[in-house]
Structure formats: C-alpha cells, structure tokens
Image: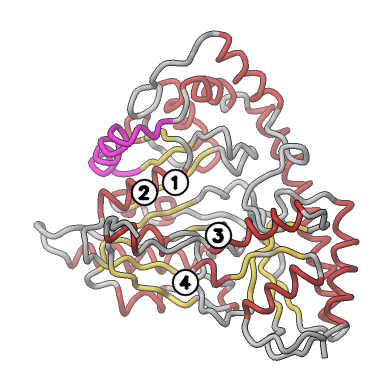
Amino acid sequence: MEKLSRLAENMIGSEIVRLGNEINERKRRGEKIFNFTIGDFDPAVFPIPKPLEDLIIESYKNHHTNYPPADGIIELREAVSVFLKEREQLDYAASEILIASGGRPLIYTAFKTVVDEGDKVIYAAPSWNNNHYTNLHKGRHCVIEATPENNFMPTAEDIAPHIRDAALVCLCTPQNPTGTTLTKESLSAICRLIIDENKRRGAGEKKLYLMFDQMYWTLTYGDIKHYNPVTLHPEMRDYTIFIDGISKAFAATGVRVGWAFGPVAVLAKMKAFLSHIGAWAPMAEQHATAKYLPQKNLVQQHFSSFKTQLELRLRKIYEGLMALKNEGFNVDVIAPQAAIYLTVKFDLAGRKTTEGVLETQADVTEYLLGKAKLAVVPFYAFGAAANSPWYRLSIGTCKIDDIEPFLAELKQALQRLE
C-alpha cells in the first residue's frame, strides 16, 4: 500500500457514510427502507422557499458567476447584519460577518485559527464532527460524556474541571444529533466559566474561545427558546465565534450560504484561511440571499409553514414511539425540542433473534435496518460510547404517509425479539 501522510493514514472513517452506503445498496436491490439517517432535506418534501429559488435563477441570468469577495459581498453581509439584529437582537456590523459555502468551512477555519497542535478542545459526545475537526487539527480531545438527564447537553459542572488550559469550547444548540437545546441557565453558567477563565489568563496568553454553532436556531418548537452567549453576557462578544447560515433555516443545504460572526481579529484570520481554500459561497446565491433575507413577510411565511410541517412529523413519530414504550417495548424517546431530529433509544443488546443474539449495539443497528427496514444513526457515530443505545432520527426526508408504516414495521421487528 502506498505511504501517505500520517493524518491521511489515521483518518477516521464516517460511520454515517458507511451506513448510507449500506442503505443505498439495499435500496438498489429493491428493498423499502425508512431512511431517517440523513441530516438533510428531500427537496421534493421540503423545497427551498420559492422566492429564494426565483432570486437564485434571476442572479444567474444577471451573470453573477465570478469570484465573490473573500469575506462575502457587502450586500449579503449587510442583510445578515439586519437579520440578526431584528430576529436575535444581536448587533454585528457587516465588517464583523464572514460569508462562506455553508457552516463546514467556517467551523474548519475557526479551528485553524484558534487551535494549535496539542491544544485542548472541549466538546460533548454525542455532537456533530467535533471529534473529526479536533483530529484534523491534532488537538487534544476533551470529551464530555453528555447524559439523557441533561438532554445530552454538556453542563458547566462537566466543563469546569477541564477549562484551565483549553483553547476552544464547542457548543451547538439546537444540537445535531439530538434535537435538544441548552437552557438559558445552563448556557449562562458555561459563559461565566469562559469569562472567568479569560480574566485569569495573562495579557500574553491565548484566550479561550467558544465556537457557538446555532445553525438550527430558527427551528424551535412549543415553549422552547433559543439563547445565545452574547445576549446573556455581553462580555462574551470578545470570545464567541458564531456559526450560522441558511442551510437548515430555509432547507437550503445545497445552496451553500453560511456565515460566521464574532471578534474581528479572529474573523480576519478565518477569512485568510478561506481565501486559500476557496470555500466561498457562490456569487449568484449570495446575491439572491441578500435580496431574500430583508423580505420579512416572505421569510415569516416560510418559517410558519416550514416549522409546522417539521413539528408535525417530529410529534407524530414521538407519539408513536411513546406508544411502543408504553406497550412494554425497550424503546424510549426525548420529546421534540428543536431542529429536525429526535433522540431515540433502542435498548436491545442481549435480546435474541432467530439468527442469534444481538451482542453489540452495532448488531442492534443492523437488526433495525434488516428487520424493521429502519435506518437511524447511532450516537456512537457522533463520538458516544460504542455501547450507547441512543440514536439520531432525522425527519428531513420524511413523508407523512411513511410514519404509520414505519411504526408498524418497527413494532413487528420488536415483537420478534425474545
């Protein structure tokens, strides 16, 4: 085998990609699979807003096809500034906003900017890709094992013992993969830890930064509210790198328009990294988004319809799984709070099938796929322990008519277990 870089040879493969390949192979063979793995949207079920689509087409007709500025076109940065001010009461100037092709390059360059080799990165498990980004930057993993008692969110008490020499704390709320949120009190307590730690550090020392991924912040349900560090504690403005964009709010994952905002000095370095990578949002999509965001009525119409449809699916599946739990099956589920995810528990390891015993959680995952035709992503794909019985169920591609058949198939599969 050809010798490659140490990083390449030690790269950890994606469990989600592996599972996705198996699902595609089964579908190719003609199997009906209830695929709840994808943290994305089926455009046939959840298309992007029609006015945004029209504006993108118009932008291409107007030949907006050249390179954009490295930090994004001024019209979009100004539109984002107003959007944040009106909807989240966050006051960030266009010069404090950086545009990129979705959240991923912004997360990558945030790590690049503040994490040196050997630096400690604090993040919870499960959480999306923090383990991979830490690995890519040769950081020191400080993994907080989140628990269902805290809705799988890290707490200040969890973080406090590890904060003294950390470079970065990673938070995502609403969270991928759990669909849960940080409470006002919990987020406030974590902010106070970061503020106090930065006060303790000397003038020549690196600061401790918070990467605050709020890509799903517009998608909360019922009485659930989204809180952010800077509104709760204005001092956090100097230490918070926000990750945001249109990907989830407008079912526009493939449109690739994301933004970061935060300390100007940090964003300037992120911009420099982005300029070498070339991970800019496409020019036409930037112009279209800049024209769409200020249209308050159209945006509100989208959110009203979109969130209603998402919540309907989440609650139907939640109620169905709770009914199975109440019938005595070893399943559980956390009530929907936000995003497009449900946190579901299949505590089936050790149960017998006609083929043998489900010895590991991986066996449980395979059984659900093979017998219930149910594809969900295990939390061990998000850095949790290999024996964790919890899963992410995503409804971004879910048709309402598929919910009852999926629950019926699942019940039959559970009934077959001894």
* For discs 1 and 4, the disc positioned in front in the rendered view: 1
Of residues 311 and 375, the one drawn nearer to the viewer in this rendering:
375
Tell me, yes or no, whether the two marked residues, 2 and 1, touch with CB atoms within 8 Å: yes
What mark, if any, has residue 175 been given in the picture?
A: 3
**Residue 181 screen position, x and y as percent:** 57, 62
Can the viewer see residue 156? yes
Q: CA distance from mark 4 to mark 3?
A: 11 Å
Residue 25 location, x and y as percent?
70, 56
Q: In terms of sequence position, does the residue under pointer 1 or pointer 3 come before the other?
A: 1
| Amino acid on which disc 2 is placed | Tyr
Q: Is residue 356 left or right of residue 272?
A: right
Contact between labelled residues 3 and 1, with CB atoms less than 8 Å apart: no
Position of residue 353 measured from the top left corner of the image (x, y, whole percent): 79, 86
Disc 2: which residue: 108
Q: Quadrant of residue 264?
A: top left
Q: Nearer the viewer, mark 2 or mark 3?
A: 2
Residue 159 vs 213, above or below: the answer is below
What's the magenta region? 262-280
Q: Mark 2 and mark 3: span between their CA atoms? A: 18 Å
Q: Nearer the viewer, mark 2 or mark 4?
A: 2
Kind of residue indicated by mark 3: Gln
Which residue in the protein does label 4 denote?
154
For image coordinates 63% across by 57% down, the residue present is 20
Q: Give how far apart the Cα atoms at labels 2 and 4 are.
A: 22 Å
What kind of element bears circle 4? loop
Q: Is 131 drawn above or below residue 55 in the view shown?
A: below
Query: Considering depth in this image, is 297 or 173 the residue closer to the camera?
Result: 173
Tag 3's secondary structure? loop
Q: Earlier in the sequence, mark 1 or mark 4?
A: 1
Kindly identify the residue that appears in the image at 58 percent across and 40 percent down. 253
Image location (x, y in percent) of residue 51: 68, 23
